[in-house]
Image (cartoon, rainbow, N blue to C red):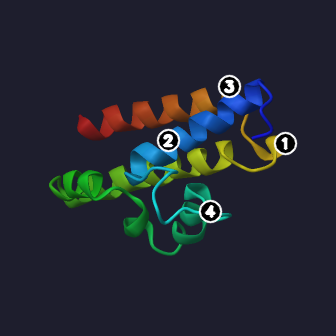
Amino acid sequence: MAGKVSAKADVYSDGNLLLEIFTGRKPTDEQFDGDFSLRQWVAETFPVAFPDVIDSHILNQSNTIPTERSAAMNELLVMIIEIGLSCSSVSPNERMDMKEVVVGLRRIRQKTRMIEG
């Protein structure tokens, strides 16, 4: 955010990208102006209203699969949003390490494969 290149800056960008992909919203959307950001919206909305955060196209796909698999997919979406929020923390010291991000995303991929059977 201060214009410095570092591994923590890359993690920040990756976190914002995850949030952008899975919410279907861009940080430049009109609702995000001034001090109100995509990350802040997700952080405030996510724990209370999970379906409001996730892109409706993703949720619609999740709703077409059997209930037990749908619940598992929603759990994976929660994990993805949590990684996105952690990576995009304002303070670089609060951000995940890239190795942790990779481990988390690999775990999600493995669980996705198990769900898909």
Q: Residues within 10 Å of mark 4 (few under 14, many from 20)?
A: some
Tell me the distance, in whole angstroms, between the alpha carbons under discs 2 and 3: 16 Å
Q: Looking at the image, do the residues carrying marks 3 and 1 touch, with CB atoms under 8 Å apart?
A: no
Which of the 4 image quadrants contains residue 112?
top left
Kind of residue sitting beneath label 2: Leu
Residue 18, numbered circle: 2
Write the residue at 21% across / 57% down: 60
Tell me the distance, in whole angstroms, between the alpha carbons under discs 4 and 2: 14 Å
Mark 1 sits on what residue? 93
Which of disc 2 and disc 4 is earlier in sequence? Answer: 2
Mark 3 sits on what residue? 99
Tell me the distance, in whole angstroms, between the alpha carbons under discs 3 and 1: 15 Å
Q: Secondary structure at mark 4?
A: helix
Kind of residue sitting beneath label 4: Gln
Q: Residue furthest left?
A: 64
Q: Which of pointers 4 and 1 indicates the residue nearer the eye?
A: 4
Residue 40, numbered circle: 4
Which of disc 1 and disc 4 is earlier in sequence? Answer: 4
Q: Secondary structure at mark 1?
A: helix
Give the percent coordinates (x, y) of residue 75. 43, 54
Q: Looking at the image, do the residues carrying marks 2 and 3 touch, with CB atoms under 8 Å apart?
A: no
Tell me the distance, in whole angstroms, between the alpha carbons under discs 4 and 1: 18 Å
Give the percent coordinates (x, y) of residue 27. 52, 51
Q: Residue furthest bottom?
A: 48
Which of the 4 image quadrants contains residue 40?
bottom right
Determine whether, in the image, residue 65 is placed left or right of residue 56. left
Which of disc 1 and disc 3 is earlier in sequence? Answer: 1
Kind of residue sitting beneath label 1: Asn
Give the percent coordinates (x, y) of residue 58. 28, 51
Give the percent coordinates (x, y) of residue 28. 50, 51
